[in-house]
């Protein structure tokens, strides 16, 4: 699977994911020049690059994602990780999803973690 993490996604979760699975294909939005970008711009980028977005943003990202789906724009998927979820549990759930599913299964979906 190919992931992108939102600008404010918990860095401890990212580090833990990469410590446990160094080959994981994940990049940070700020590393591709999108620091401070608005949600539609981030979703455009992830759609163009076929990356599932990891975010804590329950307030705005899902609405923009659903609009993309209705407008038939590419939407590889979004995992909205509850920011109150423990780091270890977030890492475990994301790695389980990554190991037991295919990227195409999450297309046009907004999934809230914990499952």
Image (cartoon, rainbow, N blue to C red):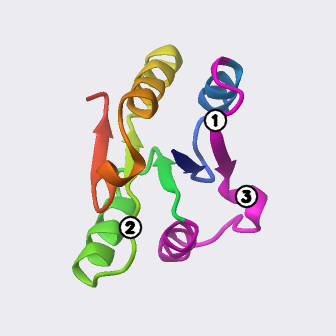
Q: Residue at x 54, y 74 (%)?
A: 48
> Where is 66 relative to 73, above or below?
above
56 in magenta: no
Between residue 104 and residue 4, name the one nearer to us: 104
Q: CA gap, disc 2 to disc 1?
A: 20 Å
Left or right, 52 with reference to 10: left
* Residue 71, image quadrant: bottom left
Q: Give the structural element (helix, strand or loop) at label 3.
A: helix
Do residues under tags 1 and 3 come within 8 Å of each other at their CB atoms? no
> Where is 23 relative to 86, above or below?
below
Per the rendering, the mark at residue 14 is: none
Left or right, 2 with reference to 72: right
Outermost top residue: 88
> Where is 36 relative to 89, above or below?
below
Q: Which residues are magenta?
A: 20-49
Q: Position of residue 89 (x, y in %)?
A: 43, 17
Residue that carries the numbered disc 2 in the rendered image: 75
40 in magenta: yes
Between residue 90 and residue 96, name the one nearer to us: 96
Per the rendering, the mark at residue 30 is: 3
Q: Position of residue 12 (x, y in %)?
A: 65, 26
Q: Position of residue 32 (x, y in %)?
A: 75, 64
Left or right, 71 with reference to 40: left
**From the viewer's perspective, is the residue at label 1 or at label 3 nearer?**
1
Q: Does label 1 or label 3 sit earlier along the sequence?
A: 1
What crowding class fits label 3: few (fewer than 14 Cα within 10 Å), some (14-19), or many (20 or more)? some
Q: CA gap, disc 2 to disc 3?
A: 19 Å
Q: Give the structural element (helix, strand or loop) at label 2.
A: loop
What crowding class fits label 2: few (fewer than 14 Cα within 10 Å), some (14-19), or many (20 or more)? many
Residue that carries the numbered disc 1 in the rendered image: 24
Query: How many numbered discs?
Result: 3
């Amino acid at each position: 699977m190919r992931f992108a993490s939102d600008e404010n996604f918990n860095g401890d979760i990212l580090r833990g994911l990469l410590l446990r699975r160094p080959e994981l294909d994940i990049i940070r939005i700020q590393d591709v020049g999108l620091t401070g970008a608005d949600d539609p711009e981030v979703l455009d980028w992830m759609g163009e690059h076929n990356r599932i977005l990891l975010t804590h943003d329950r307030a705005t990202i899902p609405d923009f994602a659903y609009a993309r789906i209705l407008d038939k724009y590419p939407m590889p998927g979004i995992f909205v990780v509850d920011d109150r979820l423990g780091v270890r549990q977030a890492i475990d759930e994301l790695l389980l999803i990554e190991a037991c599913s295919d990227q195409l299964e999450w297309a046009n979906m907004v999934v809230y973690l914990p499952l």
